[in-house]
Image (tube, rainbow, N blue to C red):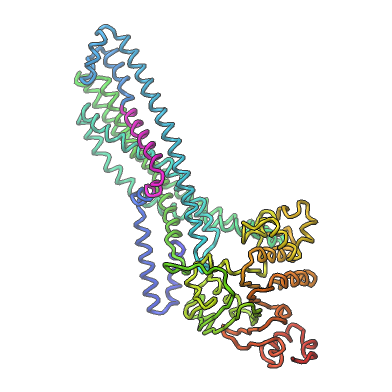
Amino acid sequence: MNYFLKRMNNSTLNELGDKRKAIAHKIKTLLEAQRKKSSFAALVRWAIDLSRPYKKYVRVILGSLLLEALVSMAIPWPLKIIIDNVIGHHQLPKFLRWMDGIFRHESFIELGTVAALSFLVITAIGAIAGFIDNYYNEKVAQLIANDLRNKMYHHLQHLSLAYYDSHQTGKLLSTLTADVSTIQDFASETLMKMLVDSLTILGMISIMFYLDSDFTLVALAVAPFLLFFVARFKKVMKNATREVRKDQSDMFIVLQKGLESIREVNAFGRQDFEEERLRKISQETVNASLKAKRVKSVVSPLVTITVAACTAFVLWRGAHLVAAGTMSVGALTVFLWYMSKFFSPVQDLAKMASTIAMVTVSLERIEGILGLQTNVKEVSNPIQPGKVKGQITFEHVCFEYLPGEPVINDLNLEISSGLRIGICGPTGSGKSTIISLIARFYDPVSGRILIDGTDISLFTLDGLREQIGFVLQDTILFFGSIRENIAYGRPEASEEEIREAAKLANAMEFIEKMPNGIETIVGERGFTLSGGQRQRIGIARAIVRNSPILILDEPTSSLDTESEKLVMEALENLMTGRTVIIIAHRLNTIRNVDKIIVLCKGEITEDGTHDELIVKKGIYREMCNDQLWSEHITAKPAR
């Protein structure tokens, strides 16, 4: 949500036409309205919804909270008995007169002993209830945070790649960690504390009226003004907190990018530049945090002084009543205890206003992710494709990443099963987009794509992608063993299948030389291996997956001659018996395919075999000449 609001600034709107400008303004207004709806009440409702799966724990928490509230109301009464009935020799309160039959009027020591023991028992019960409350509260908070992280990660995993084209992963990681942690802290501490205070205050008001109605009315008269003040303050605090969160996300992005690209940073000697970037954004975060703290620091003393003034009035007036004999010292003591507990929620709200503001902002950011809809959706009753033969058909397919800027334009293409197709063309001609459309990383704007005569939009996404194996230009390996990386596309593969795939990929040669063989741990992104080794592991991964359709996206473009030879041998083993699509810049990798497609500006400009295209003397021939193959190619007659 915040991303879209940031992007829709005035300069962006000015670049749009009148119609688009009106639509963009309407969307911006709706997003602003949605942001204003994120209230404390919505936050509580959200917390309740998240805790529904853990009803039995919540019941235990509520029971312990109720017990804590009762204990809080009972705690001052033993003290009142000591002051009024043991020391002051007054009669017991009406609801305790039954004790007169047990204790003689002169047995003040016995009464004091019972009051002291009662205080101990009440405190012990409160401590046990507090332990149960704290433990199960933390348990529910941890489970909620775990569910929330998993839900968000699942949602992010199933968003289309179009979302990631325009969003920074650093901000997403910040939301997955910092914002979820904020929600967890709110659920485990703030929310439960407010529930305890709310339960306690209900009982205290009635007891305060019983002790002295005038003093109670004074306390009740002050409370609305304090609540109004805190409510006004929360809005200011929320804006300050939103700025803090934004700066923290930006700092997270800088840290992530700097550490993720540490090799490039060192290679270009840009450590000072990266450190300066961090210093700048870190200082902005510090300034925003201090600003938020200044706002928070103003409110707490003001509320404390207001409460102290009300308490001072009760002390002053109470002293007169005690001196006049119309109120006992114990009753005044109990009333002051209850009044402090009555104002406690208001004081806590002032102190927790910054926490509530942070949680509200975190909720906005989390809802901003969970509210996103993927551009690539399954139909209501998708079908499992089973094991396809591999025939691929493009029918009048058009695609664009940005409105009005077509990348693929009315593409018609038939690829028979078992055929090897090479696709080449200038940079930006739409080569990689074609393979993204086949795997439904994106959906075409118009037209359709079929596999074995069935529209791929009718398949389940997982089922469709199981039919496709990928070997990309730069194989990404994950931190873990070589065995785990080879089996990544099919975790249930047996040890024998994994080793056989490594052998067919010409990878066992270097794997067996490693300290722990196939169990050797590769570093982050596989940087402990050479480019050729990573590619061969990527080929082994595709062999294990055993998909009927194979897509090779410039698999040798970044390799030296020796590594390219080994990789090409491995690819030959992989391509046997499959429908193969090869995206190529090095045209020697597609020289022997069944058919070559030449793309230019999203359209097929040439197609045929290598020799047929050389004879045509078109774009393909020019590309070959540009790669210094002209002498060899022109000397060889076309078949």
Span highlighted in magenta in the image: 47-73
| Closer-to-camera residue (34/351) | 34
Above or below for 263 versus 185: below
Query: Residue 319 placed where, x, y %?
Result: 25, 23
Is residue 66 visible in the rendered structure shown here? yes
Q: In the current view of this chain or complex, which residue is farthest to the top?
A: 106
Q: Residue at x 59, y 58 (%)?
A: 254
Query: Residue 243 placed where, x, y %?
Result: 46, 55
| Closer-to-camera residue (82/300) | 82
Query: Residue 270 placed where, x, y %?
Result: 68, 61
Q: Quarter holding the N terminus?
A: bottom left
Query: Residue 218 placed where, x, y %?
Result: 23, 35
Q: Quarter holding the C terminus?
A: bottom right
Q: Residue at x 31, y 46 (%)?
A: 229
| Closer-to-camera residue (399/276) | 399
- Assess whether residue 59 is covered by the magenta stretch: yes
Above or below for 581 versus 303: below
Q: Main secondary structure of the magenta part?
A: helix
The image quadrant that residue 637 belongs to is bottom right
Above or below for 292 versus 30: above
Above or below for 559 versus 301: below
